Amino acid sequence: MSARESILGRIRARQGKSAVPTAAERDAVRTHIAAHPHNARPRGEWDVVARFREQALRLSSTLEVVESLALVPAAVARHVTGHALARQAVCWEEFAELDWGGAGMEVAIREARDGDSVGITGAFCAIAETGTLMTVSGPRTPATVSLLPETHIAVVRASRVVRGMEEAWQLLRDEMKSPPRAVNFISGPSRTADIEQTVTLGAHGPYRVHVILTN
């Protein structure tokens, strides 16, 4: 039993319930969520992909559009070369088969470690309303790849751009049998204004977030 299951099991025991939720309990929760209406939301008739691009740029992310996944390695190489970075990166497993060597990139499929300067990830989805990336943790999607390197490059499929936060959570509920350990929302480079109200990038994470948008 994991620590998470142990903690939740003790809470349920104090409530006089079994350690594991029953099928009826799970169905009741799903029914409640499905019946719960969305709260008031801003009006927006915009195209979701165009809106995402606009908002991502507003958040100080950079963005390039390519026609297919096969063109991603060349786009990554252009970005790192433009910032005078070494052509080395760590990457999520889903992009392992891309032709990184052909683009002059040396890419390792693993979690990020101290000293890794570029991390390449996908995204569970992207949120058009705010220009935010949503990632979920897992064995094939380690969060460190987007958090530790100073440059985070995210590959986003246009089909995974949703209108707002409500649609993002609904997509997660529809596609994942159980919640991941962590859900991260990435809205541009890390920043803080704690010191004299001066915005500083890269305080708690990447200095750069570069989005490669593809079909």
Image (cartoon, rainbow, N blue to C red):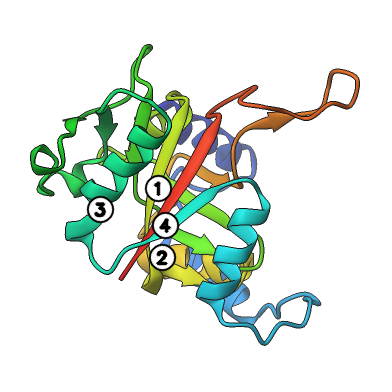
In the picture, the disc for residue 154 is 1
Mark 2, Cα crowd under 10 Å, few <14 / some 14-19 / many 20+, is few
Query: Which residue, given by chain and number where applicable, does mark 2 sit on?
Result: 23
Q: Nearer the viewer, mark 2 or mark 3?
A: 3
Q: Amino acid at mark 3?
A: Val
Tell me where residue 69 sits by quadrant: bottom left
Q: Which residue is mark 3?
A: 72
Sooner in the amino-acid sequence: mark 4 or mark 3: 4
Task: Estimate the spatial distance between the alpha carbons at disc 1 and disc 3, rounded to whole Å.
Answer: 10 Å
Q: State whether residue 188 is above or below residue 111.
A: below
Mark 4 and mark 3: span between their CA atoms? 10 Å
**Image point 62% across, 33% down: which residue?**
190
Image coordinates of residue 70 in percent, x first then y, are 17, 59
Amino acid at dot 1: Ala
Quadrant where the C terminus lies? bottom left
Callout 1 secondary element: strand
Marks 1 and 3, the one that precedes in the sequence: 3
Q: CA distance from mark 2 to mark 3?
A: 43 Å
Mark 3 falls on what kind of element?
A: helix
Using the image as rendered, state which of residue 85 and residue 40 is in the foreground.
Answer: 85
Viewer-nearest of discs 1 and 2: 1
Find residue 196 and report its horizontal and vertical position in percent: 91, 20
Q: Quadrant of the N terminus?
A: top left
Amino acid on which disc 2 is placed: Ala
- Three-letter residue code for mark 4: Glu
Q: Residues within 10 Å of mark 3 (few under 14, many from 20)?
A: many
In front of the other: 167 or 36: 167
